Each structure stands twice: as C-alpha cells, then as structure tokens.
Image (tube, grey):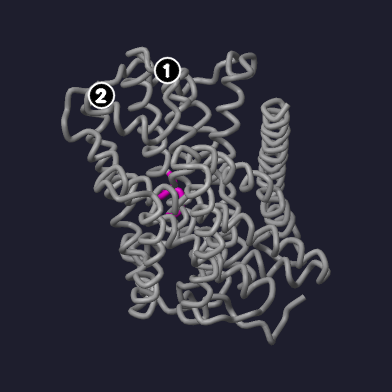
Amino acid sequence: MAHSDRKPSLPEVHRSIPIPNVKSFWRKLLAYAGPGYLVSVGYMDPGNWATDIAGGAKFGYALLTVILLSNLMAILLQSLCVRLGVATGRDLAQACRDYFSPRVNFVLWVLCEIAIAACDLAELLGSAIALQLLFGIPLVWGVCITALDVLALLFLQGRGFRYVEALVITLVGMVGVCFAAEILFSRPDVTGILAGYLPKREILQNPEMLYIAIGILGATVMPHNLYLHSSIVQTRNWQPTTEKRWEAIKFGMIDSTAALSLALFINSAILIVSAATFHLSGYQNVAEIQDAYKLLSPLLGVSAASAIFGVALLASGQSSTLTATLAGQIVMEGFLQLRLPPWLRRLATRLIAIVPALIAIIFFGETSTGSLLVFSQVILSLQLSFAVIPLVMFTSDRRLMGEFVNPLWLKSLAGLVALVIVGLNGWLLLQTFLGWLHLSS
C-alpha cells in the first residue's frame, strides 16, 4: 500500500550521507556506522542506572544474566527496525499510518508521545541530578539548564547528521571510559562476574529478585528507539537495487549490534561496580543514584570515583535527550504528517517533561526524583507492546516486505521475544499498581 505523497521523516537529513561505491568492507562499514550508537544511548539512559544500581547492591552479580538477555532481545528488535526501514522506505510510525485505521493511529500516537515524554523526564532528571552532584546546582535550576540542549541539537542538525552522530558517539564513549575506570577502582571478582552471566532458577523463585529483573528488562528496550532506528537508517543514500538494500541491511545490523554490545558493557559495568562496592560492604539497600554517588569515593578509597560517576551520568542524560527529541520528531511526522519547525517540536517535548519534573521537585522535595524515575520506566513499559507488536507484524508480512520478509526462524524468534516482553511488562505493571495500592491503604 504505497503512498506516493508520503514525505520521508527527518526530511532535512534523509538520504544525506553518501555510501562509497567501493569494494572495501571497512570503508562501507564506516559510512553505515552511526545510527546504532544513537539507538544505543536509550539502552543506558538514567532510567537504567537506578535498576542496575539496585540490582547490583542487593543481589551482587546475579542479575548480569538478565542484562545479557535483555540486550540480546534489543539486538534482535533493532535489527528488525533496520530491515523495515531499508526494505520499505518507511519508518515504523509511517508503516502504522499506512496500515491501521485513523482511530488506531491516533491512540498509538498519543501513547508514543506519552512514552517519549516519560523517557525525556528520566533523562532530564538524570542530567539535573548529575549537575547537582557535580556542581551543587539545585535540582530546580538543573532541570531548567538541561532544557537548553535543544539549541545544541538544532545547531548540529543544521551542520549535517554526521555531527549529531559524532556528538552522541563521543558522549557514549565518555560513559564507557568512565565506567571502565570505575571497574578498575572497584576491583570486582572476575569469577563472580562470569558466574553472574549464567542463568539461575533463583531469579524466578525470589519475588524481589524477579521484580528488579523485570525492571531491568523494562528499562532496557525503549519503545521510541524502534521508531527512531527505522527512520535514521534512511539517512544513508544507498542505491535502490535489491543487492544494495541487502548490503544496507547487513551493515545496518553490524552497526547496531556493535553499538548495543557497548551498551551491554556499560549496563553490566554499572551493576558490577554497584555489586563490588555496595553488596559486599553491607550497603545492600542502595537504590538511588544520589546515594551511589555519595558512597562511591569513601567505599573505594578513590577520591575521583564519585566525580567520574557524575560525569558519566551527565553524558548519559545529555546523549539520551538528543535521541528522544529526534524520536519525537519522527513520531509526529510519521503518524500525523504534521511538520513543526524542529525548535518548536523540541520545545514542546521538553515542556511536557519539564512541567511534571518541576512540580514534583517543588511540591514533594528533591527526594521525589527516585520515585519519578521509576514511574517514568513504568510508563515506558506500558507503551512498549504497542511498538514491538506492529514491528514484528510488519517485518513478517510478505506483501509489505517482499523478499526482505523475516524468514520463518526469525519470525518465530521475534514473536517469542515480543511475547516475553509483553508478558514481563504486564507483570511489572501489575506488581507496581498492587504496590501503590498497598502503600495508599
């Protein structure tokens, strides 16, 4: 069901990056590298930090297996996004618009906007907490300062999409270097780490462990990333032949797998540092980012440890907000075909996140940020099914995908991953609501 009047999303950067017509594998890989890293930041944003820190402090290295599993699921889902974007020339939002009724699309769009605002809220709070920890800036002012990164994105996008990718890759690299240093400081038990990656029955039998495990899964796969990735793979200007499309799918998948492997390292590192530092020294209830920051230096005996942690948090929050903005633009253009100037779109997304953050901080005090972070992850869990199911559906539809359709093994695997994610997120929501009811009674 092709729509000839459909304009591409992010038209200012669509097909803007040339692909060299050479035999060299490495030159092609370099040309295709980038989108995966923009997607990977959603897998290590401040929302993940809280669950990883809590998991490591309480249960040592045991939940590393959950981080590994959720990353493998993410790699599979992001490869489907590459497939959809390259094979159809549509992103996920446009595919939904073409195939569902206007009413269904409106509901999907509203849910997606709420998820992007929730995601932006987590990133905004992460950046504001980092500014407070590093420079003593009150959270209210920190929230306002982080609103200014809209200007950075607009400036870079005006220069070319490669500049946006370069900034994000630099920030992700900073987070990686910071946590490599933290691992050296915390001297973790290598045998314990290796054992942590092995599946354990205990995770399913211990309700508290299962709750954090599902929190890690819920915080890992981000709904807006699926919309984002299916659009930004189309910034590459491959030739529209079958052979070149298969090539674009291959290199796009290598790019996202490499980037998500870096995300796996960073998420594992957060949990490993938390386990090595807090679990063994009796601080097993550390769950707040602020507490982890205050305790790192004294417990490790390294004065720079807390500051490095703060710098990594700031880099993580900033890189995530840049990609959430792009996702917002893609979703609005894809579902509604509504094109706002990028600065206006950015401002709208930011305000939706800033208002609840400021209200919570002003009325409930700075201690409310932890609950807000958890709440934002619950909202993301709610929305995830509505992005994962259409993605698996579209990429398994031969009429839409032609010869690029998922083979039977991939269809089955993707269907299983979708079922697991929907089931686990449903369980997480149920537990969260029961917890709230219990607290309010």
Residue 306 position (above or below residue 163):
above
Instruction: Give the percent coordinates (x, y) of residue 194.
Output: 39, 20
Could you tell me which residue is drawn at 54 percent across and 43 percent down? 372
Q: Is residue 340 magenta?
A: no
Q: Secondary structure at mark 2?
A: helix
Residue extending farthest to the bottom is 5
Task: Tell me the number on the disc at residue 284.
Answer: 1
The residue located at (37%, 35%) in the rendering is 290
Of callouts 1 and 2, the N-terminal one: 2
Checking the image for residue 383, the label placed there is none
Q: Residues within 10 Å of mark 1 (few under 14, many from 20)?
A: many
Front label number (1 vs 2): 1
Circle 2 residue: 186
Quarter-wise, where is residue 427 in the image?
top right
Q: Residue at x 24, y 48 (%)?
A: 135
Residue type beneath disc 1: Gln
- What residue sits 27% from the left and 28% below the top? 296
Residue 256 in magenta?
yes
The stretch in magenta equals: 255-260
- The residue lying toward the viewer, choosing from 406 and 5, is 5
In 3D space, how far apart are the residues under numbered discs 1 and 2 (Cα atoms)? 16 Å
Helix, strand or loop at mark 1: loop
Magenta region, main secondary structure = helix
